[in-house]
Amino acid sequence: MNTRAVRQAAGVAVLLAAVAAIGVLSVPYWENRALDGDLAALVARQGASGWDDDRWRVAVLEAAARRGVSTQSATVHVERRPGGPRVEIRYQKNVDLFVYAVRLHLRARSGS
Protein backbone atom coordinates (compact mmCIF):
# COMPACT_ATOMS: atom_id res chain seq x y z
CA MET A 1 0.00 0.00 0.00
CA ASN A 2 1.44 3.36 -0.87
CA THR A 3 1.89 6.20 1.60
CA ARG A 4 -0.38 8.58 -0.23
CA ALA A 5 -3.37 6.22 -0.01
CA VAL A 6 -2.77 5.72 3.71
CA ARG A 7 -2.66 9.48 4.31
CA GLN A 8 -5.84 9.98 2.31
CA ALA A 9 -7.62 7.22 4.21
CA ALA A 10 -6.47 8.73 7.52
CA GLY A 11 -7.69 12.15 6.41
CA VAL A 12 -11.09 10.77 5.47
CA ALA A 13 -11.30 8.94 8.83
CA VAL A 14 -10.50 12.15 10.74
CA LEU A 15 -13.04 14.08 8.70
CA LEU A 16 -15.75 11.48 9.36
CA ALA A 17 -14.94 11.48 13.09
CA ALA A 18 -15.23 15.28 13.17
CA VAL A 19 -18.59 15.19 11.38
CA ALA A 20 -19.85 12.51 13.79
CA ALA A 21 -18.69 14.58 16.80
CA ILE A 22 -20.47 17.65 15.45
CA GLY A 23 -23.62 15.60 14.96
CA VAL A 24 -23.52 14.24 18.51
CA LEU A 25 -22.80 17.66 20.01
CA SER A 26 -25.54 19.40 18.05
CA VAL A 27 -28.35 17.35 19.63
CA PRO A 28 -28.15 19.01 23.10
CA TYR A 29 -28.12 22.44 21.50
CA TRP A 30 -31.28 21.68 19.49
CA GLU A 31 -32.92 20.34 22.64
CA ASN A 32 -31.95 23.57 24.41
CA ARG A 33 -33.60 25.60 21.63
CA ALA A 34 -36.78 23.56 22.14
CA LEU A 35 -36.66 24.34 25.87
CA ASP A 36 -36.27 28.03 24.98
CA GLY A 37 -39.48 27.76 22.99
CA ASP A 38 -41.26 26.05 25.88
CA LEU A 39 -40.21 28.83 28.26
CA ALA A 40 -41.32 31.50 25.78
CA ALA A 41 -44.73 29.84 25.53
CA LEU A 42 -44.97 29.56 29.31
CA VAL A 43 -44.20 33.25 29.81
CA ALA A 44 -46.59 34.24 27.02
CA ARG A 45 -49.39 32.19 28.59
CA GLN A 46 -48.82 33.04 32.24
CA GLY A 47 -46.88 36.33 32.13
CA ALA A 48 -49.76 38.39 33.51
CA SER A 49 -50.90 35.78 36.03
CA GLY A 50 -49.18 37.39 39.02
CA TRP A 51 -47.33 34.23 40.00
CA ASP A 52 -44.71 34.56 42.71
CA ASP A 53 -41.10 33.53 42.05
CA ASP A 54 -41.51 30.08 43.60
CA ARG A 55 -44.44 29.25 41.32
CA TRP A 56 -42.39 30.34 38.30
CA ARG A 57 -39.52 28.11 39.44
CA VAL A 58 -41.85 25.12 39.72
CA ALA A 59 -43.34 25.78 36.26
CA VAL A 60 -39.88 26.13 34.70
CA LEU A 61 -38.66 22.94 36.36
CA GLU A 62 -41.74 21.10 35.08
CA ALA A 63 -41.10 22.35 31.54
CA ALA A 64 -37.46 21.28 31.81
CA ALA A 65 -38.44 17.85 33.14
CA ARG A 66 -40.72 17.34 30.13
CA ARG A 67 -37.63 17.89 27.96
CA GLY A 68 -35.53 15.48 30.02
CA VAL A 69 -33.52 18.16 31.82
CA SER A 70 -33.03 17.40 35.48
CA THR A 71 -31.83 20.27 37.62
CA GLN A 72 -32.53 22.03 40.89
CA SER A 73 -34.65 25.00 41.86
CA ALA A 74 -31.53 27.04 42.61
CA THR A 75 -30.61 27.05 38.90
CA VAL A 76 -33.84 28.82 37.92
CA HIS A 77 -33.71 32.60 37.97
CA VAL A 78 -36.79 34.79 37.79
CA GLU A 79 -36.49 38.48 37.04
CA ARG A 80 -39.44 40.85 37.22
CA ARG A 81 -39.65 43.34 34.38
CA PRO A 82 -42.31 45.87 33.37
CA GLY A 83 -43.28 43.82 30.30
CA GLY A 84 -43.54 40.58 32.25
CA PRO A 85 -41.21 38.13 33.91
CA ARG A 86 -38.03 36.77 32.44
CA VAL A 87 -37.14 33.23 33.42
CA GLU A 88 -33.83 31.48 32.95
CA ILE A 89 -32.57 28.01 33.76
CA ARG A 90 -28.95 26.90 33.71
CA TYR A 91 -28.03 23.26 33.50
CA GLN A 92 -25.30 20.88 32.45
CA LYS A 93 -25.49 18.09 29.92
CA ASN A 94 -22.87 15.36 29.66
CA VAL A 95 -22.14 14.09 26.16
CA ASP A 96 -19.96 11.06 25.45
CA LEU A 97 -17.84 11.43 22.33
CA PHE A 98 -16.46 7.97 21.68
CA VAL A 99 -13.47 8.02 24.09
CA TYR A 100 -13.96 11.53 25.49
CA ALA A 101 -16.72 13.03 27.64
CA VAL A 102 -17.82 16.64 27.26
CA ARG A 103 -19.83 18.58 29.84
CA LEU A 104 -21.87 21.28 28.16
CA HIS A 105 -23.08 24.23 30.23
CA LEU A 106 -26.41 25.31 28.75
CA ARG A 107 -28.88 28.09 29.47
CA ALA A 108 -32.46 28.41 28.35
CA ARG A 109 -34.26 31.68 28.90
CA SER A 110 -37.34 33.54 27.94
CA GLY A 111 -39.38 36.58 28.75
CA SER A 112 -39.20 40.24 28.00
Image: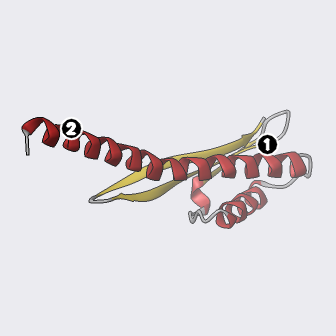
- Closer to us: 31 or 50: 31
Q: Which residue is mark 1?
A: 85
Residue 50 falls left or right of residue 16: right
Q: Position of residue 42 (x, y in %)?
A: 81, 52
Residue 74 falls left or right of residue 83: left
Disc nearest the viewer among 2 and 1: 2
Q: Position of residue 2 (x, y in %)?
A: 7, 40
- Closer to us: 53 or 71: 71
Identify the secondary structure beneath mark 1.
loop
Q: State the CA–CA distance, disc 2 to disc 1.
A: 55 Å
In the image as oriented, which residue stretches furthest toward the front?
A: 1
Q: Which residue is mark 2?
A: 8
- Closer to us: 74 or 88: 88
Q: Is residue 6 above or below residue 58?
A: above
Residue at point 71%, 58% (across, down): 60
Residue at point 42%, 59% (across, down): 94
The numbered mark, 2 or 1, whose residue comes first in the sequence reads 2
Residue at point 45%, 53% (across, down): 24
Label 1 Cα crowd, 10 Å radius (few <14 / some 14-19 / many 20+): many
**Amino acid type at mark 2:** Gln
Q: Is residue 34 above or below residue 80?
A: below
**Amino acid type at mark 1:** Pro
Q: How is the image coloured?
A: secondary structure
Q: Which mark is residue 6?
A: none
Identify the secondary structure beneath mark 2.
helix
Q: Position of residue 63 (x, y in %)?
A: 72, 61
Q: Position of residue 108 (x, y in %)?
A: 63, 46
